[in-house]
Amino acid sequence: MILFRLILLIPALLFFPFTFCQGEDGTAPASSIQNPANAATFGSRIIQSSLWTPEELMGKPEDKIAVRLTASFNGNLPQRKIPVNIQAPLSPELQNSIRRVAPINGIKVIALTFDLCESATEKSGYDAEIVNYLRENSVKATFFAGGKWMLSHPDKTMQLMTDPLFEVGNHSWSHANFRTIDSGRMDAQILWTQAQYELFRETLRERVIAKQIDPSEMNKIPKTPLVFRFPYGACSPIALDKLKYFGLPAIQWDIVTGDPARGRSPTEIAQVILQKIRPGAIIICHANGRGYGTAASLPLFVTKLRARGYDFVTVSELLTHGPAVSHKECYELMPGDNRRYDRTAGMKQSDHR
Ligand SMILES: [Zn+2]
């Protein structure tokens, strides 16, 4: 099996002139790591509180501001391009584009998700107000982070990784449109991000050792992101095949808040969620500074949903509650509705294969 996987990886290894890195314990690359069904915890409060002060965790309002970079910008490439840890291929029920879960016995579990998108020509933001609300109210959530976003927000990434409330998923490297890029770029967009996460996990491990924290606390932080979200919600059969091979479920949504639209009010966001909520729902929001009414909407729906019996869980936890409801196409609300992005996105990634 390992030989088979290495044979399949040969094109990727040729594509990236980098050596295959050693594992934490010095062994060869692991083949199968965590299955989402086994994922229960995602962080360590001990590690987090040892490495950052409460003020550092709070962040600053200006963290939210995105900065546009020059068109010729060609920095911020990952130090590692092939991850050490590759998941086992997906089982058939997780291979399509997952829109929600059908919880067994209708248990009222839902997943709140926030995308941390960052394209090749920008440094996007971090919405501290959202994260602080979630922490203060013990709301579990999943953050789909771009690899480039991770690299430009190292402390925020590691703070999210160490937080027991949160799961960090993969949102591609530089927000490419997977319907318009070629196979090699798909590999890069997926694997660079997995590798960048690993580098930050290794940094965390070094800091844990330096601070003389019990090293077993690191076991609570997944070795690799366990879930993936396509930018623009755009995929292709080849892209879904890639995720199947790399063991990353494609997580979409069934509730669109529309929060990147300027002028979208907190009340409108909360209304959409309160009207469309159902057991197993996956809600998409943004925490990269482009969720304009998002932070202010949280108090308008979190308490109400809890009063109606809903529990917030991470996406990997949601997947343990019942079968995934999926579709062979990726779309926003109905098949074909996000093809408008094909003309404008995915062609600006020349700086980032
Ligand atoms: Zn995005």
Image (cartoon, helix red, strand yellow):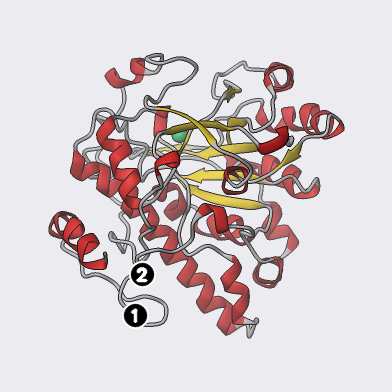
Q: Nearer the viewer, residue 246 or 289?
A: 246
Where's ligand 1: which quadrant?
top left
**Residue 179: x percent and y percent?**
28, 28
Check disc 2: other Cα within 10 Å, few if <14, some if 14-19, many if 20+.
some
* Residue 225 badge: none
Q: Quadrant of the N terminus?
A: bottom left
Q: Amino acid at mark 1?
A: Thr
> In the displayed structure, would residue 206 be above or below residue 233?
below
Q: Give SS at disc 1.
A: loop
Q: Nearer the viewer, residue 317 or 83?
A: 317
Q: Nearer the viewer, residue 338 or 38?
A: 38
Q: CA distance from mark 2 to mark 1?
A: 8 Å
**Residue 312: x percent and y percent?**
71, 41
For image coordinates 59% across by 81% down, the residue present is 215
Residue corresponding to mark 1: 27
Residue 123 visible, this angle? no
Q: Nearer the viewer, residue 156 or 142?
A: 142
For image coordinates 48% across by 71% down, the residue present is 203
Residue 151 left/right relative to 53: left
Residue 347 visible, this angle? yes
**Residue 337: x percent and y percent?**
41, 14
Residue corresponding to mark 2: 30
Query: Residue placed farthest to the front in the image?
Result: 105
Check disc 1: other Cα within 10 Å, few if <14, some if 14-19, many if 20+.
few
Q: Give SS at disc 2.
A: loop
Please give the count of numbered marks on the rendered protein: 2
Q: Quadrant of residue 183?
A: top left
Residue 88 left/right relative to 112: left
> In the displayed structure, would residue 5 be above or below residue 126?
below
**Residue 78: x percent and y percent?**
32, 58
Q: Amino acid at mark 2?
A: Ala
